[in-house]
Image: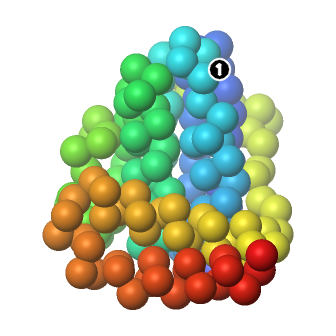
Amino acid sequence: MPEKANVMISRDNDHCHIVVEGRATFDCSPPLKNFADSIIPGALSKVIVDLRNCVWMDSTFMGTLATLGLRARQAKIDVELENIGEQNLKLLRELGIIKLFVIKGAADPGAPQPGKWEMFAHKADRKEMAKTVLEAHETLMQVDEKNIPKFKTVVDFAKKDLEKED
């Protein structure tokens, strides 16, 4: 299992499949955020996120996943989480973002074959990383007000980082 997460995406007609492997942290969040920001109404009917081999998620990744859930909801696209695992399910419940997703058990046997997968990884610069961290945590606070005291300090630090970069 990789120490850092691999995020792979495959499109199959009107479905998008995302596989997350390893420790999903802020490092792998920018590509997922870019995908969420590119969602166009009517272009997809469903986004399926397979977390079978995702061993842990940090708050930035979960906030970015919440951003995906919100953007998809606005575009009337379902986001299904498959093979989520008890630990990851607990994390998403604690942050109150589980309500953005449809929870499924096992993966669809008709999912694309591995040869069609594209790995999404790029080294984000400091500004892109600070922006991703900021937006992820602002989303967590927006989705559930109980997250405000948990992440207000993170948001303040991310804003200061962005100001330094400008």
Tell me if I can see residue 160 in this picture: yes
Residue at screen point 53% across, 70% down: 134
The spot of residue 39 in percent (x, y) is 60, 30
Vertical placement of 92 versus 66: above or below?
below
The spot of residue 54 in percent (x, y) is 49, 63
Task: Read off the residue under disc 1.
Answer: 12
Residue at screen point 47% across, 36% down: 71
The spot of residue 153 in percent (x, y) is 39, 87
Residue at screen point 56% across, 56% down: 20
Q: Amino acid at mark 1?
A: Asp
Vertical placement of 72 versus 70: above or below?
above
Residue 146 image-quadrant placement: bottom left
82 vs 117, left or right, is left
83 vs 6, left or right, is left
Front one among 150 and 46: 150
Tell me if I can see residue 94 in this picture: no
80 vs 126, left or right, is left
Residue at screen point 28% across, 81% down: 150
Residue 44 image-quadrant placement: top right
SS under mark 1:
strand
The spot of residue 109 in percent (x, y) is 49, 27
Vertical placement of 33 versus 134: above or below?
above
